[in-house]
Image (tube, rainbow, N blue to C red):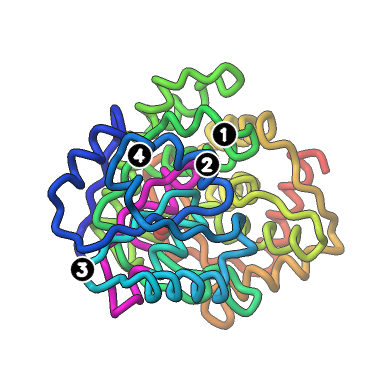
Amino acid sequence: MKQQDVILCNDLTTELAAALQGSSYDKIFLLTDAHTHQLCRPLLKDVSVIVSAVEIIIKADDINKTLDSLADVWMSLSRMGATRHSLLINLGGGMVTDLGGFAAATFKRGIDYINIPTTLLAMVDAAVGGKTGINFNGLKNEVGAFAPAMSVWLETEFLRTLDRENFFSGYAEMLKHGLISNKEHWVELLQFDTHQIDYARLKTMVGTSVSVKEQIVIEDPKEHGIRKALNLGHTVGHAFESLALAQNRPVLHGYAVAWGMVCELYLSHIKSGFPKDKMRQTIQFIKDNYGVFTFDCKNYEQLYELMLHDKKNCAETINFTLLKDIGEICIDQTADKETIFEMLDFYRECMGC
Ligand code: GLY
């Protein structure tokens, strides 16, 4: 799998214009959703290649990461004369970069695409690393392909307009990168003033965070081994996300991951000896900034089933990524039902629900 360039921009407008100037693409397409069409595209009004690109606008939000939206993109590409030598630029959050990446990976068996993520979650996770896809048959990211973008352009100026919930949703993935990388980055993340955001500092931290993911993806692009480190917090997190959806009280992905990390740090502590003080400090940060996802013991069976049916797992076992310490990763760990129920007890007790 080819590597992708991830560029932390100082000025997206001039840098992107320079990069695309004189490119040999026969046509350039711009994929936006209803939000990024309105809020982000105008910020690129000085990039002539963007202004003259054919824009394809899809409906916003994860519920629209569907086969129908994908077919709309294929149809627009086809009708507007896209060829194998065309370029698709995805401007948006993870929904746009996932779906647009998959559209590009499949249209005429694959055309070039670049990602310009506009949310923190997409910058540090979704838009980087080549995972593309759509939700299908009620399952998240059920159909997709590993297909890296040519380049990913990180313009942190977009983050100034992000609401707090979406800021924290992305920040959870940064916290995960801190936990799986090194103590300095983890401390920096816990100490960052999330109430009074210093955007210059955030930009540097986004650079550090994304390079944690890049290094892992370079080593294991198709998740046969160490890329599973990026699943920390996600086994339980996905179960929380699905339970919340089933109960008609959807939560943002990063929030579910943050609460999932509370559980998986507990498992890390009891199974791999993750230090108690670091577990407590991380949990306190999550409690302070993410609040609590509430459930009771009547939901344990359902949560267990949801974990069992997560696509990372084989029929009978639930797979976790755990930590021995900050940056000391143990992939392919399992836990039995009793331990998982104990973990849920721990979560409810320490989060106070
Ligand atoms: N979001 C986890 C990964 O890209 O592998």
Name the residue tied to disc 4.
154
Marks 1 and 2, how far apart at CA:
10 Å
Q: Can residue 153 be seen in this view?
A: yes
- Which one is in front, 183 or 60? 60
As helix, strand or loop, the secondary structure at mark 4 comes to strand
Q: Do the residues labelled 1 and 2 touch (CB within 8 Å)?
A: yes
Name the residue tied to disc 3.
85
Q: In this view, does 145 lie to the left or right of 189?
A: left
Quadrant of the image occupied by residue 58: bottom right
Q: Which residue lies furthest to the bottom in this view?
A: 315
Q: Where is residue 39 drawn, in percent x and y?
A: 53, 39
Q: Give the range drawn in magenta.
A: 104-131
Name the residue tied to disc 2.
170
Ligand 1: quadrant of the figure: bottom left
Marks 3 and 1, how far apart at CA:
34 Å
As helix, strand or loop, the secondary structure at mark 3 comes to loop
**Measured along the vertical axis of the image, is residue 296 above or below residue 316?**
above
Q: Which of marks 2 and 4 is nearer the N terminus?
A: 4
